[in-house]
Image: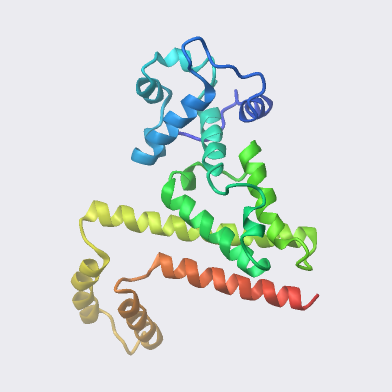
Amino acid sequence: MAVKKDTGFDPARTLGLLWRVGNKPSRTGLSVDAIVDAAIAIADAEGLDAVSMRRVADRLGVGAMSLYTHVPGREELADLMIDAALGSLYSGIEEPSAATDGWRAGLRFVAERNWILYQRHSWLLDAQGPRAVLGPNTNDKYEAELRVLENSGLSDVEMDSVLTLVLTHVAGAARALARFDRVREESGMSDAQWWEATAPVLEKVMDRDRYPVSSRVGTAASMSYDAATDPVHEYEFGVERILDGVAALIERR
């Protein structure tokens, strides 16, 4: 499913769809919500590329043309899917700040929830673009996550930058994990099996005298992970180091 906006894309029209301005179900019960739910179910099962207006229509048992009365096209549908998926992140705007004590625990909570979200809806990693989808759930998410940094001593711009840093790290680690899962499935080999087959050959061709540091570090890491790397470890390690950096920034205030 392409998410690149074509020349016919109308941001104002999409914004109206996201906030359900003037949207009403048809006589058959077909609605924007029903279309979006069907599209998300397809994406969860088969990935974003599997989502098309025809596939969604087939899942709903209606003609493809009937969808266009509610959703103009795939680009708008992608935005609606993103915003809908973000609606499951928190029980309410207050949850991240109310469920934790202090900004550090709050940011860790935010990171964990987003990490889990990407495991549930891995297609979000392909769907999200550089421009925010300004729907109600997206706005709720931004507000909820910023509140954990309120009264931390950071400026407003720093609050936005810190949150962006955490979320970018989480998305990158989640993307790495998704690639690892895909490679395991396509190759039919676990990481341990791949390393078992690779290590003896690498030992023969790689000169340890030329690469003394990388040989030592690589061996220690692979033995620890039982693989070449571990995206889950990188996610956890990265979050804590980011939080250490934020703490240092706050202390300088």
Q: Measuring 48% from the left and 17% from the top, which residue is drawn there? A: 30
Instruction: Name the residue rendered at 70%, 77% in the picture.
Output: 248
Looking at the image, residue 212 sits to the left or right of residue 87; the answer is: left
Report the residue at 46% width, 55% height from top. 116
Residue 7 vs residue 223, the one in the foreground? 223
**Quadrant in the picture for residue 19:** top right
At which x and y percent is residue 161? 69, 60
Can residue 171 be seen at all in this image of the molecule? no
Inspect this view and state whether residue 217 appears.
Answer: yes
**Left or right placement of residue 226 versus residue 151 in this view:** left
Measured along the vertical axis of the image, is residue 110 above or below residue 196?
Answer: above
Please state, as top left, top right, bottom left or bottom right, where the N terminus lies in the image. Answer: top left
Q: Is residue 44 above or below residue 248?
A: above
As drawn, the residue found furthest toward the front would be: 98
Q: Position of residue 144 (x, y in %)?
A: 66, 51
Which scheme is used to colour this image of the protein? rainbow
